[in-house]
Image: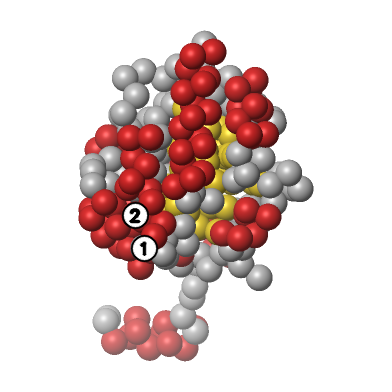
Amino acid sequence: MPNTVNDIIQMKSREKITVLTGYDSTMATLCDKVDVILVGDSAGMVMLGYDDTRDVTMDDMIRFTTAVKNAKTDSLIVADLPINSYENEDSAITNSKRLVQAGAHAVKLEGGKEIEKIIKAVVDSGIPVMGHLGLLPQTAEKYSVQAKKSSDAVNLLEDARILEKAGVFSIVFEMVTRDVAKIITESVKVPTIGIGSGKNCDGQVLVVHDMLGMFEKIKPKFAKRYLNLSEDIRNAINSYVKDVKEEKFPEEEHTFSMEKEELEKLEKEIG
């Protein structure tokens, strides 16, 4: 049975939640064992070659979401609202509905108290919302660890409680000190999903291309590489190029032939 938002909520403090990004149907099919597939705006960097997520558009996110939906995965599909797509309540609801129509079961927004009313409006419209606190890639001037000081930790906890009250079903915490992530996880009733925020969150999320060793441009400290596919892929491509150049590919097993009689007829017809 496909995962639902309620399934994810019920996993808090009972079972760790697994989340990976997905941007296309092929990868989403392979990721079907995870609880949540996040169609992140990180697709702009990983798939489109942007320097950051600020150039990602709604059209981009709709295309990626549709591709993941076409995988017919049992994972819950959560799609990011890209920058400038939720500047007010009306635009947030309109664009959230577009992502749901594309195949998302829920949407994710970055920010705390400053978007409280926007989150509440989306939730009230019937669309589940995942929050995102700590490092906010859409607006961050630089990537740095969050909540190192007690005053920042207090503000982050306040934001988490505000998001919970606004109706989010879970909250991503990015690059938050593990101590603070643990405190907040124990202080809110909704599941917390960590990325670079320690093991005490209710779940973990990674960019799948980081986890598989396919994205070389950025190598975050928090991203464990389970494979080094970039090297394997390069080796395979180099082998292919060599085989073609040396006429070792295609071989007989990779080709198709006419029946002998038909070939003789053709040769006779064309002289």
Q: Quadrant of the N terminus?
A: bottom right
Q: Report helix, strand or loop for mark 1.
A: loop
Indicate the amino acid at tag 2.
Ala
For residue 118, side relative to residue 250 (left or right): left
Q: Report helix, strand or loop for mark 2.
A: helix
State the residue in front, 234 or 122. 122
When the figure is inspected, residue 134 is found, relative to residue 71, above or below; the finding is above
Q: Quadrant of residue 52?
A: top left
**Residue 105 visible here:** yes
User: How is the structure coloured here?
Assistant: secondary structure
Residue at numbered disc 1: 125
Q: Position of residue 258 (x, y in %)?
A: 46, 80
Q: Position of residue 254 (x, y in %)?
A: 54, 64
Give the residue displayed 64% in from the left and 27% down from the top: 183
Residue 121 numbered mark, or none: 2
Taking the view exactly as shown, the residue that stands out farthest to the top is 149
Give the residue displayed 27% in from the left and 47% down from the top: 86
Q: Quadrant of residue 270?
A: bottom left
Residue 150 numbered mark, or none: none
State the residue in front, 6 or 34. 6
